[in-house]
């Protein structure tokens, strides 16, 4: 790796990604709530194959099929990034690891920060292709993503071992399967992660189910009550609300 120019790395790493959509919005969940980002939704999800409980309340089932959307090159994707932060979401983005590594390399060259949202079942990419921009030292194994959100799903809430020490934000959805002991176990295993507890969004009567009913409060109070109780009992955690849905944003 020594002596290899960054332009060379960018050339080697060109790999396409199957993209469902690219759009600008405010981050609606977790630690970065309210911050403008360009969202890149990638095709393909392993939740149905693995039998993960999130398939019951997933709000983006159109992203599950790996052949959905259109193939795009990293440079083409980033040309449509209008903000200094890009959030990779899905589906499960890391099913397209090779393309993601290429996109991160291109993003670093352009000075764009890359956030990742993953269910944690796929090992994070190896450190082999993580160079920084020209004049900066090579990035280490823990710096591929500028922010990594891991949201493990029921029934087993499994997170691949390679994520140990690399999770910035641990997001847990407070459906009926989430127990305090499970959340505590995950938080203890990943002590450097910010723990966000998020209620399940029950679709309201608005367009595509994205707008809340009157009073700007979605149904599903039991999930909300469970999330609030968990946070109140663990004051080092925080409540995450899907504010983009309250606002009718994407």
Image: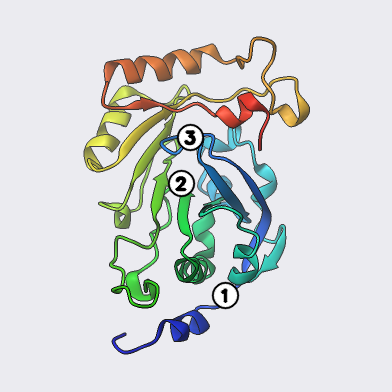
Most foreground residue, 180 or 140: 140
Extreme residue in the bottom direction: 3
Find disc 3 in the rendering and name its residue.
Answer: 33
Report if the CB atoms under discs 2 and 3 are less than 8 Å apart: no
9 sits to left or right of 17: left
205 sits to left or right of 56: right
Q: Position of residue 209 (x, y in %)?
A: 71, 27
Sooner in the amino-acid sequence: mark 1 or mark 3: 1
Q: Is label 1 or label 3 in front? A: 3
Query: Residue 127: which quarter of the image?
Result: bottom left
Q: Residues within 10 Å of mark 3 (few under 14, many from 20)?
A: some
- Cα gap from disc 2 to disc 3, whole angstroms: 19 Å
Instruction: Kindly identify the residue that appears in the image at 31 percent across and 27 percent down.
Output: 237
- Cα gap from disc 1 to disc 3, whole angstroms: 30 Å
Instruction: Report whether residue 90 is seen.
Output: no
Q: Position of residue 150 (x, y in %)?
A: 41, 45
Q: Residues within 10 Å of mark 1 (few under 14, many from 20)?
A: many
Find disc 1 in the rendering and name its residue.
Answer: 15
Instruction: Kindly identify the residue that appears in the image at 58 percent across and 25 percent down.
Output: 201
Vertical placement of 106 versus 223: above or below?
A: below
Sooner in the amino-acid sequence: mark 2 or mark 3: 3
Vertical placement of 226 versus 178: above or below?
A: above
- Cα gap from disc 1 to disc 2, whole angstroms: 23 Å
Quarter of the image where the N terminus is located: bottom left
Residue 119 numbered mark, or none? 2
Instruction: Report whether residue 29 is seen.
Output: yes
């Amino acid at each position: 790796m020594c002596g290899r120019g960054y332009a060379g790395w960018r050339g080697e790493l060109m790999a396409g990604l199957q993209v469902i959509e690219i759009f600008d919005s405010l981050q609606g969940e977790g630690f970065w709530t309210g911050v403008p980002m360009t969202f890149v939704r990638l095709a393909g999800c392993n939740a149905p194959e693995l039998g993960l409980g999130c398939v019951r309340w997933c709000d983006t089932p159109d992203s599950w099929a790996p052949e959905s959307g259109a193939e795009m090159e990293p440079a083409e994707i980033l040309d449509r990034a209008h903000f200094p932060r890009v959030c990779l979401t899905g589906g499960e983005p890391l099913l397209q690891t090779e393309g993601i590594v290429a996109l991160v390399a291109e993003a670093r060259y352009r000075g764009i920060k890359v956030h990742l949202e993953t269910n944690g079942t796929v090992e994070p990419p190896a450190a082999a292709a993580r160079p920084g921009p020209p004049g900066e030292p090579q990035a280490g194994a823990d710096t591929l993503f500028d922010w990594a959100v891991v949201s493990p799903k029921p029934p087993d809430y499994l997170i691949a071992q390679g994520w140990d020490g690399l999770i910035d934000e641990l997001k847990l959805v407070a459906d009926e399967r989430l127990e305090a002991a499970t959340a505590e176990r995950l938080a203890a295993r990943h002590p450097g992660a910010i723990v966000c507890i998020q209620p399940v969004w029950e679709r309201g009567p608005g367009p595509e189910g994205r707008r809340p009913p009157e009073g700007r409060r979605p149904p599903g109070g039991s999930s909300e009550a469970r999330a609030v109780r968990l946070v109140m009992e663990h004051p080092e955690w925080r409540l995450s609300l899907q504010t983009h849905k309250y606002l009718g944003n994407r």
